[in-house]
Amino acid sequence: MSSLFSSHCRNVMSKRKLIKELKNEMFDLAITEPFDACAYALFEAISIRAHVAVYSCIRLDHVSEIIGQPVPLSYVPGMQSSFGEKMNIWERYMNYFQFKGSSFIFQTIGDKGYEAAKEFYPNIRSWREVVPEASFIFTNSIPYLDFPSPTFDKMIPIGGFTVKTDKKSLVLEEKWSKILNQRRTNVLISFGTNARSVEMPEEYKKSLLEVFKSMPNTTFIWKYENPEDPFIKDIENVYLSSWLPQNELLADPRLTVFITHGGLASVMELAMMGKPAVMTYGILKTDNSKVFSYKKNAERLAEILHNQPTKPLETLVKYVEFAARMDKLVLFTILLLFPIKSESFKILVYTNLFGHSHVKALGKVADALTDAGHNVTVLMPIMERRFINETCLKSTKNVIFIEQDDHSKQLIEKWSNRSSVWTSGGITPLNVFKKATVISNLFGAHCKNVMSQTKLIEELKTEYFDLAITEPFDTCAYAFLEAISIRAHVAVYSCSRLDHVSEIIGQPVPPSYVSGMYSPYGERMNIWERLENYFVFKARSYMFQAIGDRNYEEARKFYPGIRSWREVLPEASFIFTNSIPYLDFPSPTFDKIIPIGGYTVKIEKKFLKLDEKWNEILDKRKTNVLISFGTNAKSDEMPEKYKKSLLEVFKSMPNTTFIWKYENPEDPFIKDIENVYLSSWLPQNELLADHRLTAFITHGGLASVMELAMMGKPAITIPVAADQTRNAEMLRRHGGSIHLRKFDLANSDLVKGAIEKVVNDKRRVFFSLKQFPRHEFFQALPCHTNNYKKNAERLAEILENQPTKPLETLVKHVEFAARSVGITDNRLKCFDSDSENYR
């Protein structure tokens, strides 16, 4: 093979006149498949520096080695592997040698090709140096369909980009339609282009003939290169054709099964068209119930693939245009390719002591980096002193607090005494605009106090931190980073998205199907809901932008030369979001936005053990329900009518134990009710991990939603404030939860009905909207049974088998950003120019 490709490359590179003409074209970008490395010699010769790679396959083993992509061969099959992801020790050895053998062959081909190319252009760089500089590598892979495996940020899956999926446009000719109409069962057979059926051994053909004859009520359509072959004579249920409209046939509901060689294009087509497939004829003789099961599973897979958040070719075009604007994204070259000592970076984590979820999230990040061997300092300006002993830090010991000044204390006390979240109305644009001034004054005063610490700022400036980490919930951090001259920084969200950041960095947020952070809707909205979603998005974005601008007004009183947060924030090397793509609503994203959803959740159930006290409580009854409304919505401040309603529910369900996070466990209102246990603190993660816990009634805070989703517990979500409605809708769409409004707590029948539905129902049931006005969440989803427990467990299984681990991803990207001294070149060019044309 190396001689073949070497000769071919010598011929290509000998075309000096053509190469000179192409060089004069001054192309912005080149695209090739690194199956043949000669293309990179040509790119060097015509001086194209920006290029992307596109795979027709899922992976190329030699490219994985060249770019440094992790390939754990104990569970990741190589491209030419004979095994799946579950291998015994000997199969793992075989997988390793198959991977190395395949990689060696193609690396040899690449080296020989370059030897030939250098006969004409001796100064070109090796393909081993050029390939890793690809701005992006597009793989013909669908993560949900493919084996879970580690990946890099620059590797963009666009699996199925060659497949037509619009069934309306896939219409069969009359000839094929008549054939499909002859019998109820129709089987398509194709072994692709290289494995010619006409050359199949006679014993195989005879075996298939026996199958055809034994199944007269099934039509077999076979791609066979010699349709006039007499071996099929007098068998009426078989049709031979040298060419088949395969995509159109697979899209037709009359086609029952596909017998295929398993080429990737065929596998993608049948997966996306929802057809069951076989590799041996024996499966055709199985019982009807199994065939039906295969059909349902295939259709379910197709539905999932059809509803992917992005379309393959749209993704390809978007990233290619991005790469063309950015010229050569050399900073995305994996630095592990080059000799680097094991490094320990100095990292500053800036997080306000404000809001338990924010403190917990950034604390988890700091500890993960400390555990990875880095020197981490946490800066905590105090906003809520009640969290002073709840920093959530375990491994990280170097913590610096900035005390409040008197003015900040007064404002935060006034803010803390605001009206109860239990009685406040929903989030509307008008409400948000009213709050903007109050909140910007609060954060402005806080930022003024932080930036007045000039002595501390000068001390930290001399620490020469390699990287800073903050959450852009409060943009004062960026003024602080400017003052101490830290240029490399990353952002971490405790939530799934921040609307003002989306606007500042240019992330697309189509309001017709992407819910804003504080939107009361899911992704399915009517025209009026879309309009409200748009205005809520703009209002929340306006509020946080107003906070940011006010912060900088105060910061510049001390450091007038610092740049605006609007300029600094988009330069973040990466933005880590607390989002799990499969769990969250599908939405457009950018390459630098890295989902690490669930990074605050402990999922190793063997380490989540309950104390004896909780064990005894869970053992008392078969059904156990956990109730928690989080930190900010205190249950003891709940309106009396809500409490009375819940008491009625508890009393009416004596065979169910209710464990309630309640700030005043001695409250006499619960007196003499034996099946209710109040506690000011709960081991929530441990309880959710316990198989005896039946259901969870939660406010829908993102941390709680992540925990119950990853632990596989059915839930009733009752949002109280902030992003909780969006989180509740996000979870509901997976069929494992019911979404109630906080005002529904006054309706004991509705609450009890929801609990019984989640705990007991195993049938598909459609509730009348007359019975539950505006509660469309009670309608069964087409892709789920109404067994909430099964749906919740299935979601947990999917999340457990994600190809990458959140904190590992975080650490890897943070280290990369620290080495690269700020990956500012991945800032979108749309900030600097109008539309551009590319060749």
Image (cartoon, rainbow, N blue to C red):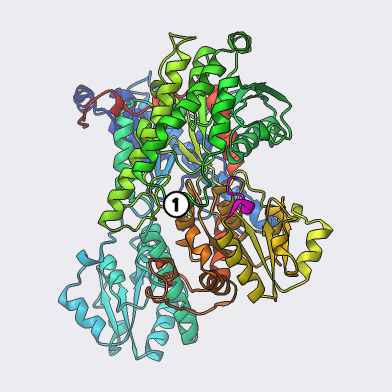
Residue 360, relative to residue 782: is it above or below? Answer: above
Q: Residue at x 31, y 29 (%)?
A: 42
Is residue 762 visible to the viewer in this orientation of the structure?
yes
Q: Which residues are magenta?
A: 632-638
Label 1: how many residues lie within 10 Å, few (<14), some (14-19) or many (20+)?
A: many
- Write down the residue under mark 1: 726
The N terminus - image quarter: top left
Residue 217, relative to residue 474: is it above or below? Answer: below
Q: Secondary structure at mark 1?
A: helix
Please provide percent x and percent y for residue 388.
Answer: 69, 31
Position of 582 compared to 217: left or right?
right
Is residue 801 visible to the viewer in this orientation of the structure?
no
Q: Residue furthest right?
A: 612
The C terminus - image quarter: top left
Q: Quadrant of residue 774?
A: bottom left
Please provide percent x and percent y for residue 375.
Answer: 68, 23
Q: Nearer the viewer, residue 370 or 260?
A: 370
Position of 706 compared to 162: left or right?
right
